[in-house]
Image (cartoon, grey):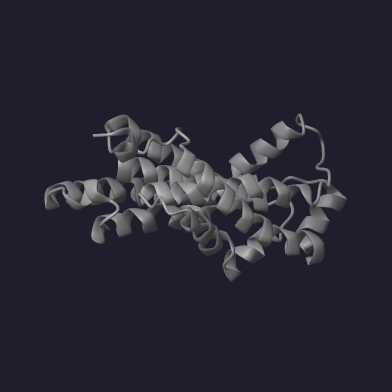
Amino acid sequence: MTTSDRNPLFTISDIDKRQLTAAAFAAILIAIPIILMVPMYLDDFLRAVTGSYKWSKDGRPLAEFIYRSMGFDSASLSLTSPLGMLLCIPGICFSSVLLCKIFRNQKIWAAALAAIFLFGQPYFLANLSFSFDSPMMVLAIFFSLCSAYLIVCVRRRKAFLASIFLQVCSLSLYQAANSAMWIPVLLAAIFPTVSNKKLQEESPLSIALLLHRHCICCTTCACTVFLLRRHSIEKA
């Protein structure tokens, strides 16, 4: 098996660099209208005025931990708009390239298309309009895609445990991002494409094992959501 077949997660090839450039172009096109035209949401305004964190009460403790760490555990938040949207651009780029890695798509334009489908669709555009929340939401998508990559492309015991950990981190940032994990896994298992030759050539038993691990990961994540929800109710 060659290095290109393995398509390692932390290796950036020349093709990956070109895809990152294409994804960056799409990400900038997505970000500019939001930065220039979208007014501050009420949620951002209240956080800016009161300086409160309060992500843990929404079942997102990791988001609060990251913001407190970035502010050196200061007593209140500071409004940094449009820095939040600018921080989303690298996350959008790497998430888009990672989706291409999952499906072994080496077309340069595929990363730009992935950026548009993941982050430029109407539902997530509304999320990107939140100055404080948008970086955590993009990071949650990235963690979910990393989890999907480990399940689909690596499929070792340590990688499976790491995928569960990453998915728990994703849920602790933004619960709705979990679909970025299970949708690619199901698509890779049910509809193995020509570009994903390794998965296509494997036996139905291997694909069944892949789905079994996916179900375990989803069950673990569902329990995590329940515990986070219970924690947020107790904090309220």
Whole-percent x, y for residue 175 in the image:
52, 53
- 19, 50: nearer the viewer: 19
Give the total of numbered labels: 0
In which image quadrant can residue 41 be found?
A: bottom right
Q: Is residue 236 visible?
A: no
Q: Residue at x 33, y 53 (%)?
A: 185
Q: Position of residue 88 (x, y in %)?
A: 65, 49
Is residue 74 depicted above or below 87 in this figure?
Answer: above
From the viewer's perspective, is residue 100 above or below residue 156? Answer: below
Give the vertical position of 177 relative to 76 (above or below): below
Residue extending furthest bottom? 122
Question: Residue at the spot x=70%, y=39% of the render?
Answer: 67
Q: Residue at x 51, y 61 (%)?
A: 113
Judge whether residue 42 can be spotted in this image: yes
Quarter of the N terminus within the rendering: top left
**Residue closest to the eye, 70 or 225:** 70
Q: Estimate the x, y position of residue 234 in percent, counting from the top left.
A: 59, 47
Find residue 103 and report its horizontal and vertical position in percent.
Answer: 35, 52
Q: Nearer the viewer, residue 86 or 221?
A: 86
96 to the left or right of 24: left
